């Protein structure tokens, strides 16, 4: 176990964003025995203009956290965990890739770096570990600092045009220059390992203390979901490009008496028109993470409908173990074959619409089987964040001990 270390973690999601994230979860857990400064994904000028009346921006502005003279520190419930807010950064993604963009990016990275230096000086920090937690937008922040170890935490493939535009070059720098690279899927690990020998596979996990509340008698099933007639086949997450809409069309039409419920934000540009028109498909919109246990309790069967392609082969979804931690029968498309090693025989991974249809029917019929419920919970208990953190700590300790002198 790591104890008494200091971490600076540059995260992609903000600590008060609408969704739980691998990045902030690991930061919170490291802070149980270490001092952690979690650097929120910086607000750009554009972000500030479009979100200036949001509670998040108003809070930061009221406390003066955007000011250069401020340390930008925001306290949390854990005295070891500090949120770092940087001054506003220039909006740069519209600039074409090239020398001009990289020079402007260096300016933005200097602003982040200077904030870190302010904190190091004010807190008299002698040594620390720096983690870029999938914020590939700012790859060279650690350059000019003197961390005893640099880590890149890669949690997803780069797919979206906004990310790919500059991210492929930026991420390559992080991969090549980091002392350690952590990957959340085996496919990412296999792709990156040849580029950096100190690359490790640390799969995602789940906070089953939250999702397992679905098993409690005191947890009320979500009202909006319960208004829909059973059988209720549910998905909790983003409705976006990764979903196999072609297979879902066949399955939902083959099971007209089953109701398919999607709880999460809809990325409209990826959604086919028929999806909105089919009577047994229900889009309930985004719900807070705090309501997840009640939502899962209302599902009869949980669904992982990601399509099988090169991108999905790198996905190791948190919701898989959240579903299982809630004891829910879970049916999936075979988007990532590596998941079989972590789920045993508890989750069928289907390759055809006919197979998926049958497995949904079987799962519904067996939804109340107490032995199967306990088997699912046991699998989730073997894939917790605490176990993943222990693995990360072992990797960090071993690399600290074996790094050559010149790396310090």
Image (cartoon, rainbow, N blue to C red):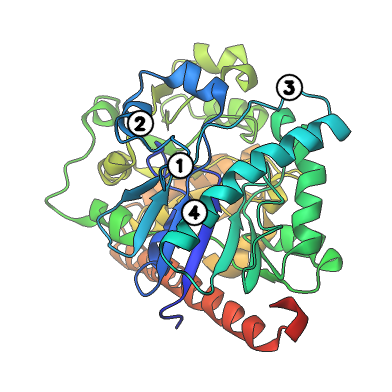
The residue that label 3 is drawn on is 94
Please say if the residues under marks 1 and 3 sit with CB atoms less than 8 Å apart: no
Between circles 4 and 1, the one closer to the viewer is 4
State the residue lying farthest toward the bottom: 401
Cβ–Cβ below 8 Å for labels 2 and 1? yes
Which residue is labeled 1 in the image?
Answer: 14
Q: CA distance from mark 1 to mark 3?
A: 22 Å
Q: Earlier in the sequence, mark 4 or mark 3?
A: 3
Few, some or many residues within 10 Å of mark 1 (<14, 14–19, 20+): many
Q: Which residue is mark 4?
A: 118
How far apart marks 4 and 2 lie (CA) works out to 23 Å
Q: CA distance from mark 4 to mark 1?
A: 21 Å
Instruction: Give SS at disc 3.
Output: loop
Around disc 3, counting alpha carbons within 10 Å, would you say few (fewer than 14), some (14 to 19), or many (20 or more)?
few
Measuring from the top left, give residue 131's x and y in whole percent: 59, 61
List x then y, in percent, for residue 144.
69, 58
> Upstream in the sequence, badge 3 or badge 2?
2
Kindly give the residue lying farthest to the left in the view shown: 218
**x and y, in percent, of residue 390 in the image:** 48, 77
List the residue tagged with mark 2: 56
Residue 230 in view: no
Q: Are marks 4 and 1 in contact (CB under 8 Å)?
A: no
Secondary element under disc 1, as helix, strand or loop, is: loop
Q: Nearer the viewer, residue 382 or 400?
A: 400
N-terminal-most mark, 4 or 1: 1
Left or right, 317 with reference to 123: right
């Amino acid at each position: 176990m790591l104890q008494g270390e200091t971490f600076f973690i540059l995260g992609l999601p903000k600590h008060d964003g609408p969704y739980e994230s691998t990045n902030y979860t690991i930061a919170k857990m490291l802070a149980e025995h270490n001092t952690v400064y979690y650097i929120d994904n910086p607000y750009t000028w554009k972000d500030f203009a479009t979100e200036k009346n949001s509670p998040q921006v108003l809070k930061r502005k009221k406390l003066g956290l955007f000011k250069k003279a401020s340390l930008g520190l925001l306290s949390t419930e854990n005295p070891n965990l500090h949120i770092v807010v940087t001054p506003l950064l220039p909006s740069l993604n519209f600039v074409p890739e090239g020398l001009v963009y990289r020079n402007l990016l260096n300016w933005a990275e200097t602003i982040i770096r200077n904030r870190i230096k302010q904190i190091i000086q004010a807190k008299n920090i002698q040594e620390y570990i720096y983690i870029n937690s999938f914020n590939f937008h700012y790859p060279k922040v650690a350059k000019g600092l003197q961390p005893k170890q640099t880590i890149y935490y890669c949690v997803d493939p780069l797919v979206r045009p906004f990310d790919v535009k500059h991210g492929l070059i930026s991420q390559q720098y992080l991969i090549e220059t980091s002392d350690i690279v952590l990957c959340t899927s085996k496919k990412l690990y296999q792709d990156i390992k040849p580029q950096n020998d100190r690359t490790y596979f640390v799969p995602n996990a789940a906070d089953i203390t939250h999702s397992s509340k679905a098993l409690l008698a005191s947890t009320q099933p979500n009202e909006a979901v319960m208004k829909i007639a059973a059988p209720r086949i549910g998905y909790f997450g983003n409705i976006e490009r990764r979903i196999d809409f072609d297979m879902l069309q066949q399955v939902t039409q083959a099971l007209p008496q089953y109701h398919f419920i999607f709880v999460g934000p809809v990325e409209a540009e990826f959604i086919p028109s028929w999806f909105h028109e089919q009577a047994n498909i229900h889009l309930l919109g985004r719900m807070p993470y705090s309501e997840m246990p009640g939502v899962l309790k209302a599902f009869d069967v949980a669904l992982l409908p990601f399509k099988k392609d090169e991108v999905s082969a790198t996905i190791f979804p948190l919701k898989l173990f959240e579903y299982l931690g809630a004891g829910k029968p879970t049916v999936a498309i075979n988007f990532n074959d590596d998941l079989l090693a972590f789920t045993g025989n508890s989750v069928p991974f289907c390759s055809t619409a006919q197979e998926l249809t049958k497995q949904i029917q079987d799962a519904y019929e067996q939804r109340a089987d107490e032995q199967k419920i306990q088997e699912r919970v046991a699998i989730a208990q073997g894939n917790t964040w605490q176990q993943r953190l222990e693995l990360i700590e072992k990797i960090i300790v071993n690399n600290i001990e074996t790094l050559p002198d010149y790396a310090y």
